[in-house]
Amino acid sequence: MNAEPEPLIVTRHTAVFTEPPKRVPSDRSVDGPILGNGDVGIVVGGTTGNQVFYVAKNDFWSQNSTRPLPIGQISVRVPAVAGAQTVGFGYHQEQDLAHAEVRAKIKEHDLSLDVRLRSWVAAVQNLLVIEIDTDSPAPVDVEVELKVIAGLKSRVERYADNVTKNPVREVTTAYPVSSGCDGKSMWITRCAEPKGQPGREAAVAVRILGSEATYQLEGRDHAVASFALGPGKSSAVLVAAVLSDRDKAQPCQEARSKVAGLDVPDIAPLNQAHREWWREFWSASFVDIEDQQIEGFWYGALYELACCNRAGKIAPGLWGNWVTTDTASWHGDYHLNYNMQTPYYGVYSSNHVELASPYYDAVLAYLPKGRMLARDLGCRGVHFPVAIGPDGMTVEVIDFGQRSNAVFCALNFITHYECTQDRDFLRTVAYPFLLELSEFWEDFLKKDEQGRYVVLNSNPVEEQGTGTRNSVIDLSLVRTLFKTVVAASEELGVHAERREKWRDVVDHLAALPSRRGKDGGNVFIPCEDWPDGKTENWCIGAWGIWPGGCVNLGSSAELLETAHRTLSQVKWRDNHPQLFCQGVRVGYGPTFSLLKETLTHSMCPNYHVYYWGGGVETCGIVMAINEMLLQSHEGFLRLFPVWPRTLAARFGRLRAAGAFLVSSELKNGAVQSLLIESEKGKDCTVLNPWTDSPVRLRRDGHAAETLAGAKVTFKTTPGEAISLARG
């Protein structure tokens, strides 16, 4: 079970759309079919006869408006049905996760018109490819409009049981745009800053292959290509190069050159490379579970993350690389009080640590400004505001009184090292950042009369008047920080003289704040001076469980009782990634049924889970699913710790702390198999899933030792595969 089974399980999950999207365009999440290669993002809107491909790019940010902007749209129209929905024409789109492509059908019931589109963003270069073919008995006219996005209406509507509050509005811009065409292609450009100001520039160039097309300039912001297909079997290919001046100094010239150099025979090998990239991606790990809704979300969320994250590229903002208006809500930026960190929660255990690479770049680029902000608070080290952008951009310099933003950013760095044991990453990337954070908190923490280290003047939430003493998120993340920096300094053999102070903080940091709840029992609260009578139905009080990591299945009965009571008083309607991870970490009984309820009511046809304030962050729910199947953060492996025993499940190559890749199966209420691949040769401990029996080990297929006990511990070597079975 050390590889993805054949055929790929992901092939079960192709989203089908039978009506046009409700939220394309939108100033928040989109609900249409999505494509992407970690840089270029495409979402499909429009109608049956007017398929609109909205084009955006992760690096196209405006310094002036401090937000990402869209670039343009490509509309593929069949004039015979481009107007009102004609009787006999149904809307049909498919989003194929396995092959990262979207397929559309424009078909009359009597087959007098039958047009098919297959679209994909090449995984290996910034090209959108739209293959158009027909079997129609009569000629089919096709029009392609290439247009700059500017002044579009932003449409944010009700979806399922979620209601938004922003009205529809129209936006106009003064950002310079241009368009052009010649006899072979057409193109548009857009600048991210007002005229006369330096900044990003992006370009899209479009060419039609395989059919004679005419190109016509329609205005300064759009151009149109026209061609005909048929009669009978015929096809054409639309290729669109999407570049910014971050890719090439002259993006328009390069985009035009790119499409000019392509012809129909080039498409098949390009698609083969695209499919091979995605096949390798899906082969890294798998889940195979009876509940197809949860399984579908797992694959859909990883697809969404892979479409908007790629090493060496700019990290996506709140709404991924599917930005369709100039007015992305909350600036579409990097919110550091949880939104930016959250999408990546599940990439580590899913064995896709590479997806977090752009996140590290974004955080580390802000360090120079973070050092200045720390000095403003009279501290060494670094401190971050709530909202930043790429390349050290400040969106809002204020921190809303939240001092936890920078230490919250450390969580993913820590998880990366724990799951990979990559010593070079620790030494060159993670530890220097952790060290600066420790300096800030050494200065910011105070000792009270009881000898506790306490946090003063730090808000747990984005509002004033809610208390500022011993915020739960500060206390829990600071505890994790100092425990980690002690272990990391020992691993690297540095800063031994500082460990006494760090250990003192861990040993004497104030406990997580709690008080009597509605039923008279203890509940966790956001901070010690949280106002009496203020609602406790937001999940902030439980942040000590996750992302704080201070309460888990191995905690005391008292702590677990407090955790369960806290979660029972939360309204599970918002901030889904935190809630489900919290529930799984402490074995809160209703978590599975609440996850099912959320997916039923809030999952869009494209597998994105939508709620009012959430964007790509909801992909973080993947962590909760993985930890229902496997947990390793306590220093040992727990198999299917909170998975319903009546529901069959298996998984392959989920990544665990200690750099282990784990595969296992649950069937008929019992663990059937366990395979552990050791990457770094660390000792491995497993909570014995067969408590009534010894455990037999096979190393690289050869019989080895037999162990017994509630937990079994054994040595490993790098690259070794160890199977465990009931003795």
Image (cartoon, grey):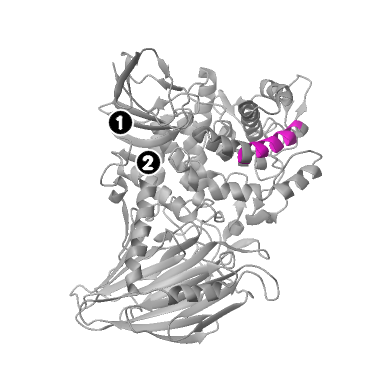
Q: Is residue 526 magenta?
A: no
Q: Position of residue 167 (x, y in %)?
A: 55, 64
Look at label 2 and name its amino acid: Ser
- The earlier-in-sequence mark between 1 and 2 is 2
Q: Residue at x 42, y 67 (%)?
A: 128
Q: Which residues are magenta?
A: 429-442
- The verdict on residue 441 being magenta is yes
Residue 438 position in % (x across, y down): 70, 33
Mark 1 or mark 2, whichever is nearer to me: 2
Vertical placement of 647 versus 240: above or below? above
Q: Is residue 304 visible?
A: yes
Mark 1 residue element = strand
Q: Which residue is mark 2?
A: 285
Please tell me which residue is depicted at 41% across the width and 65% down the height of the picture: 44
**Do the residues under discs 1 and 2 have CB atoms within 8 angstroms?**
no
Does residue 424 sit above or below 449 in this rendering?
below
Report the predominant secondary structure element of the magenta stretch: helix
Dot 1 amino acid type: Glu
Residue corresponding to mark 1: 665
- Screen quadrant of the C terminus: top left
User: What residue is shown at x 36% (from left), y 12% (from top)?
Assistant: 708
Percent coordinates x, y for residue 281 in the rendering: 39, 48
